[in-house]
């Protein structure tokens, strides 16, 4: 019998990255064409630790979505093979997609040791050392060439709000990370710096951000805790910016409610987020989202919720969606921008 190659029409760099990740998943799981297996036996035979089991289940779903396997409850049949990606130089591909350096390094390193990562014989921290940290990878996860476009769109929407309000804007950025979005906004609107509060849960991130941008304010803010108790009074912001950080909320509805209360009625919220999990993350940065033993993974393993969840959650928490735009299609570097306003009542 000849292998059934799952057909792909055009190998864009985004698709190539997807195929590289998909092939690594299939290899790590030891899938062979025209064989059958079960999820429970695969987990057992590979020695996958409990906290990473959700990743194996997500890999199998991804392989099923591509037609490589057919899933039936706990059983699966391997009915196709992952097409050739044509990638000769992974580092060059990652650079072309402008993945942050630590994220690219983690992805390249993880692909070669996926079984050991699943067994916790190697940790993500070890892969990143000595020149990067898990925090560096978290701060850069999901960012790419295409997120630049959304950062610029956010900066433009920020400027429009500033023009409409005719006074200085009180801005709070949540999960500022590498500060890419911060820089995009401040380069479009330099005077915003006087009332710009960069926040992050990580002390390390805040220290790096403050050293690089002495003109802005920095503070600790955890989206999973009460905002007022953390020193962020109700109605004390005109704009809240959350660039690819709200997926860290254990409960997205609760986090959006806290943001709504932080905003003045009529205040605006700019969220960027990958919508849906991607294959490169599932083989690299998502290891960072595996819970400590005996804890649950966020949203049952939907680290980046789909677009419709964001829309529903925004509406349910008292926001009206003003603008919504996407870049990157379904590729591993896709990203979405939601621009919403806090309703006046
Ligand atoms: C992908 S990064 C953000 C990227 C950043 N906005 C940028 O454009 O470069 C996510 C950030 O969220 C922060 N974070 C993680 N958990 C958080 C929490 N519970 N509350 C607030 N921020 C959190 C991380 O420290 C990280 O810096």
Image (spheres, rainbow, N blue to C red):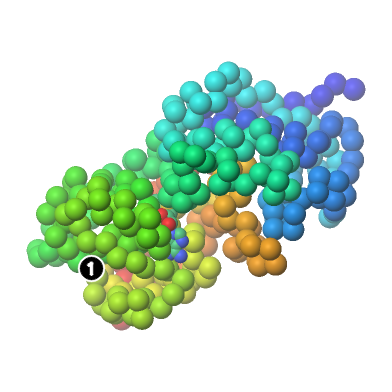
Q: Position of residue 28 (x, y in %)?
A: 74, 37
Identify the residue at the far left of this view.
Answer: 166
Q: Is residue 98 above or below residue 188?
A: above
Q: Is residue 207 above or below residue 80?
A: below
Name the foreground residue: 288 vs 20.
288
Quick check: which quadrant has ligand 1? bottom left
| Residue positioned 20% across, 66% down in the render | 170
Q: Is residue 175 above or below residue 267?
A: above
Name the foreground residue: 126 vs 154.
126
| Residue positioned 59% across, 63% down in the render | 298
| Residue positioned 90% across, 22% down in the render | 1
Q: How many marks?
A: 1
User: Mark 1 highlights which residue?
Assistant: 238
Q: Position of residue 72 (x, y in %)?
A: 84, 51
Please indicate, yes or no, whether residue 65 appears anywhere in the rendered image.
no
Horizontal arrangement in the rendering, residue 9 relative to residue 33 (left or right): left
Horizontal arrangement in the rendering, residue 327 relative to residue 90 (left or right): left
């Amino acid at each position: 019998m000849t292998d059934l190659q799952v057909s792909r029409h055009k190998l864009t760099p985004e698709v190539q990255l997807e195929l590289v990740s998909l092939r690594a998943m299939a290899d790590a799981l030891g899938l062979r064409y025209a064989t059958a297996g079960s999820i429970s036996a695969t987990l057992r035979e590979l020695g996958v630790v409990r906290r990473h089991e959700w990743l194996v289940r997500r890999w199998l779903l991804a392989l099923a979505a591509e037609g490589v396997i057919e899933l039936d409850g706990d059983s699966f049949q391997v009915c196709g093979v992952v097409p050739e990606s044509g990638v000769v130089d992974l580092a060059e591909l990652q650079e072309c997609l402008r993945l942050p350096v630590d994220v690219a390094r983690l992805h390249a390193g993880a692909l070669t040791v996926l079984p050991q990562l699943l067994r916790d014989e190697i940790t993500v921290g070890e892969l990143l050392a000595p020149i990067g940290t898990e925090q560096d990878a978290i701060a850069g996860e999901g960012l790419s060439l295409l997120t630049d476009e959304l950062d610029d769109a956010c900066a433009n929407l920020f400027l429009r709000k500033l023009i409409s309000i005719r006074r200085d804007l009180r801005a709070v950025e949540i999960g500022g990370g590498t500060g890419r979005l911060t820089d995009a906004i401040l380069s479009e609107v330099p005077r915003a710096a006087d009332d710009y509060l960069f926040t992050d849960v990580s002390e390390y991130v805040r220290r790096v951000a403050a050293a690089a941008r002495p003109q802005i304010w920095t503070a600790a803010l955890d989206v999973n805790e009460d905002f007022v108790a953390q020193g962020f009074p109700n109605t004390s912001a005109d704009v809240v910016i959350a660039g690819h950080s709200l997926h860290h909320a254990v409960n997205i509805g609760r986090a959006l409610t806290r943001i709504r209360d932080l905003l003045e009625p009529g205040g605006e919220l700019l969220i960027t987020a990958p919508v849906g999990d991607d294959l490169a993350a599932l083989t690299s940065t998502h290891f960072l989202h595996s819970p400590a033993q005996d804890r649950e993974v966020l949203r049952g393993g939907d680290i980046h919720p789909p677009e419709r969840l964001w829309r529903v959650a925004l509406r349910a928490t008292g926001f009206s969606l003003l603008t919504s735009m996407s870049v990157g299609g379904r590729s591993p570097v896709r990203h979405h921008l939601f621009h919403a306003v806090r309703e006046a009542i």
